[in-house]
Amino acid sequence: MELYEQHRGKTSDKWTNYLPAYQAHFDPLRKTAVSVLEIGVQNGGSLEIWAKYFPEAKHILGCDIDERCRALVFDDPRVNLIVGDATSEPIRRKLIEISGPLDIVIDDGSHRSEDIVRTFSQYFPYLRDGGIYVAEDLHASYWQAYEGGVFHPYSSISFFKKLCDIINHEHWAVEANRISLLEGFRTQYGVEFDELELARIHSITFVNSVCFIKKAHPLANVLGKRVIVGIEELITKRADILSKGPSSGPSEAGNEWSRLAELPEVVASNRESEIHKLAAQLDAAQARQLAAEGALACEKNYHDGLQTVISELRLEKRDLERRLHSAQHEAAAQRARVSEIEGTQAWRYTRVLSRVKALIAGGVPRG
Ligand SMILES: C[S@@+](CC[C@H](N)C(=O)[O-])C[C@H]1O[C@@H](n2cnc3c(N)ncnc32)[C@H](O)[C@@H]1O
C-alpha cells in the first residue's frame, strides 16, 4: 500500500480498497520469480509499481490496445509492453511467447463484460497452479454501457458468480459437466471453455469491484475426506455421522432447480429473442397493413374520382341529348315552314317571275 502511495514515476489509477486486497493475495508470491501480466496499462505506472513490488519477478508484462502506449519507455528490463487487443489471438500468442506460464493475470482492460469473459477464457489456461487471476473495476458490470445490469445474465459479475458453482461441481448430483453451466456465455459471446481448466478453479474472493480467482490442481479442489476429531460425543455419535455415507446426497435429477439442460438465463434469453422475433414480425405485419390501407385509400380516391367523372359525363350527355333533340325539333319546324311557303300561290308566281327575269338577262335559269 505504502509502495503504491509513494510511487513517483508514471501514473497508475486504482481504487483505495484494491490495495489491501492486492497485498493479501500477492504477498505470498512477493519474493518469488513471478511472471505478471496486466491487461490495460494506460500511463504505465502500475507496471512500474509491480516491478518494485515483486523484486524477484521474471516478467512484468503489460498489454494495451491504445496505440499511444507505444511511447511508453521502461527502465526496468523485466518490464515489457505489447500494444494491441489482448482478446485477439495474435496478441495472446505474442504475450505468452514472452512470458511463458503466468503467476498473476490482472484484467484492467476495457471492463466490458464480453471482453472480461473472453480474457478469462483466453488467459486462465496459461496461469500456473498456485497462480492468481484478478478482474478489476467490476462496478462496470452493473452498467448497461458495459453489457451489465444487476440482473444481467451475461455480465462479468454474473460470470464470476457462476464460477462459485463450478468450484462446487462435485455436489451438483446431476449428470452435467462444468462447461454446461457456462453454455449461455459460450453462445452469447462465442467463447470456449475447457472442462479441466474449470476444474482448476480453487477459490474466488470478491471485494468491492474486484474478483480474485486462485488456481490449483484439481485434486486440491475436492472436498476430501470427512475429518472428525475429539473423543467426547454427547450429541451425535461419530458412527452415526459416518454411516450417512459420502458428502454428496442422492441424485438431484428430479430437482427443477438443478436442470442444467434448461439454464434459466438461456431460457430467458431464448424467450427474449422469441419476443424480439415476434415483435419484429408484428412490426412487419403492421407496416404491411398500413401499406394496404394506404393503397385502399388511393384506390377509394381513384374510385370516387371516377364516380365524379361518370356523373359529370352523364350530365354532359343528358345536356347534349337535350340540345340535339331541340335542334332536331327546330330543323323539323323549319322544314315544315319551308314546305308551307313553297305551297303558297304567291311563291309559285314569284318563282316564274324569277325565271323570266333570268331569261331576259341571258342568264341560265337555275332550277
Ligand atoms: C483503467 S485503464 C488501465 C489502468 C492501469 N492498469 C493502471 O492501473 O493505471 C484501462 C486501459 O485498458 C486499455 N484497454 C481497453 N481495452 C483493451 C483491450 N482489449 N486490450 C488491451 N487493453 C485494453 C485502455 O486502452 C486503457 O488504457
Image (tube, rainbow, N blue to C red):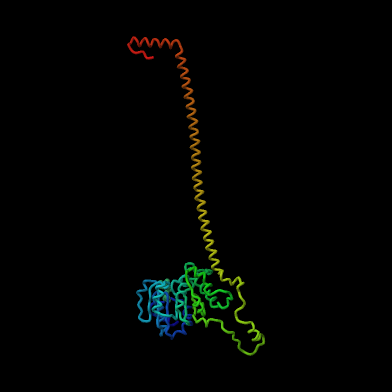
Quarter of the image for residue 350 reads top left
**Is 293 drawn above or below residue 92 in the view shown?**
above
Ligand 1's quadrant is bottom left
Q: Looking at this view, is 96 or 345 the one in front?
A: 96
| Residue 125 x, y percent position in the rendering | 46, 77
The residue positioned farthest toward the bottom in the image shown: 231
Q: Looking at this view, is 62 or 145 the one in front?
A: 62
**Is 183 drawn above or below residue 324 in the view shown?**
below
The residue positioned farthest toward the left in the image shown: 362
| Residue 337 x, y percent position in the rendering | 47, 17
> Quick check: can you spot residue 5?
no
| Quadrant in the picture for the C terminus | top left
In this figure, what is the number of numbered marks? 0
| Residue 256 x, y percent position in the rendering | 60, 70
> Quick check: can you spot residue 89?
yes
| Quadrant in the picture for the N terminus | bottom left
| Residue 168 x, y percent position in the rendering | 55, 78
The residue positioned farthest toward the right in the image shown: 234
